[in-house]
Image (spheres, grey):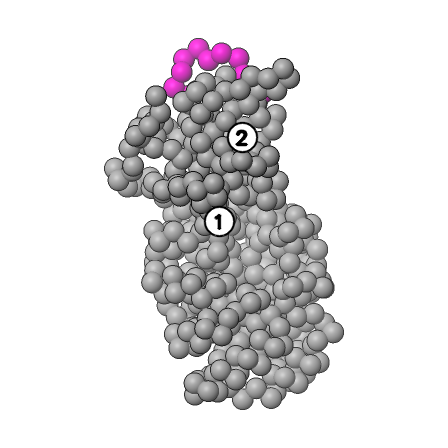
Amino acid sequence: MFDTGRIEFFDKVGTPFWFYDMDILRETVGQVVAMSEKYGVKAHYAVKANVERRILEYISSCGLGADCVSGNEVARALECGFSPEDIVFAGVGKTDREIYDALKAGIGMFNCESLQEIFIINAMASRLGLRARVSVRINPDIDAHTHAYITTGTCENKFGISPHEFDALVDLLGKCANVDFMGLHFHIGSQITDVEPVYSLECERAGQIVSWFESRGLEVKNINLGGGLGVDYDDPDGCPVPDFRNWFRIISEKLVRRPGQQVHVEPGRSIVAQCASLISRVLFVKVGETRNFLILDAGMNDLIRPALYGAYHKIENLSACLRPNLPQSQVYDVVGPVCESSDVWGSGRLLPLSVRGDLMAIRSAGAYGQVMSSRYNLKDFAPAVYSDDMHGARLRTEYF
């Protein structure tokens, strides 16, 4: 991702900034499209992972649908070229305004996560003289064995409908005259790297639940298996594109579907994570008695995942690549400038001997990075720089 020319260019750009490698994005989306066509599975990009306009416009141009979890995400998807019928609106807390706007826009489907939500959508559609297409999110009671904050498919969870509500759900759908039931939606968590057993189990459980609902007279036209395919945060250059081939193969082999049923997936992180890095600069090197600190100008306000989840991101010293006869490596705690003790990029990281002004890359930052930035400590938002449009980057105006 980082050749000499790019590093020399980065040295002229004000930090911190997000660098998007569009070649990696194109390769990744290309594999998703190829596997989608090969196995007859419709892919919807999970917009929450990254909402940059350039990213969304490219993904929509390749024919993917959009999975949205807010009204503003629905609006952004429409602005960036996604067809209304290819937009799915999920999320546990849709406001009346969001539901109204989505109904008027004619989106493809609502993924409903509670009985009361279905009731409200039906009532609003009735008042508008419209019909609402809905799919119902089901908790398959599978532990994806990821971080507790990103495990979503267990039996008791704020997401989705659990088995004890199934009979009431069937009864409600039969009474909702302005709702067209389209299918069932499953999602068990994020950053799943143990692909074969986890997704095989999801397909098995989904098939059982689909059969139960069809035995009660509901036609399940769509089976949505969610997303969650993980990426390699340890070796982003060795594995820049996740194993979509294996994921789609498992779905094709393990999910029992009858003719005419459409299968959907919603990859988000796996599409955009590896195409971006957060580029920062060493402000100070602090030498302690037992620990050495690299203090960067990027912090948890830019990328909150390490502070929020304890997430790992590979850290590289880019400037060291340009220095001949490198001194020996050293162990550092790499930290940010924010006034919180949790603003730590990584502890005990072995890096080339680093000095004030060195450029650092925090890798695999394209998903849940820029989209979750804040202005905490009244920091500025870091801008985006694209590999195929670097001439528009903001030049460095400080650092002495």
Seen as rendered, the residue at the extreme left is: 391
Q: Judge whether 134 appears above or below 8 on screen.
A: below
CB under 8 Å between discs 1 and 2: no
Give the percent coordinates (x, y) of residue 81.
34, 62
Tag 1: Cα neighbours inside 10 Å, few (<14), some, or many (≥20)? some
SS of the residue at dot 1?
helix
Seen as rendered, the residue at the extreme right is: 164
Q: Judge whether 248 appears above or below 161 on screen.
A: above
SS of the residue at dot 2?
strand
Q: Which residues are magenta?
A: 319-331
Q: Nearer the viewer, residue 374 or 35?
A: 374
Give the percent coordinates (x, y) of residue 117.
58, 75
User: Looking at the image, which residue is at 51% across and 36% down?
Assistant: 338
Query: Which residue has dot 2 on it?
Result: 335
Does residue 274 appear anywhere in the picture?
Answer: no
- Position of 23 compared to 90: left or right? left
Q: Quadrant of residue 224?
A: bottom right
Tag 2: Cα neighbours inside 10 Å, few (<14), some, or many (≥20)? many
Give the percent coordinates (x, y) of residue 13.
32, 32
Query: Which residue has dot 1 on it?
Result: 372
User: Looking at the image, which residue is at 60% across and 70% down?
Assistant: 113
Say which amino acid is labelled 2: Val
Say which amino acid is labelled 1: Met
Pointer 1 or 2: first along the chain: 2
Q: Quadrant of the C terminus?
A: top left
Tell me if residue 329 is in the magenta stretch: yes
Q: Quadrant of the N terminus?
A: top left
Q: Nearer the viewer, residue 190 or 282?
A: 282
User: Looking at the image, which residue is at 61% across and 44% down?
Assistant: 309
Give the percent coordinates (x, y) of residue 218.
62, 82
Tell me if residue 295 is in the magenta stretch: no
User: Looking at the image, which residue is at 66% across and 70% down?
Assistant: 161
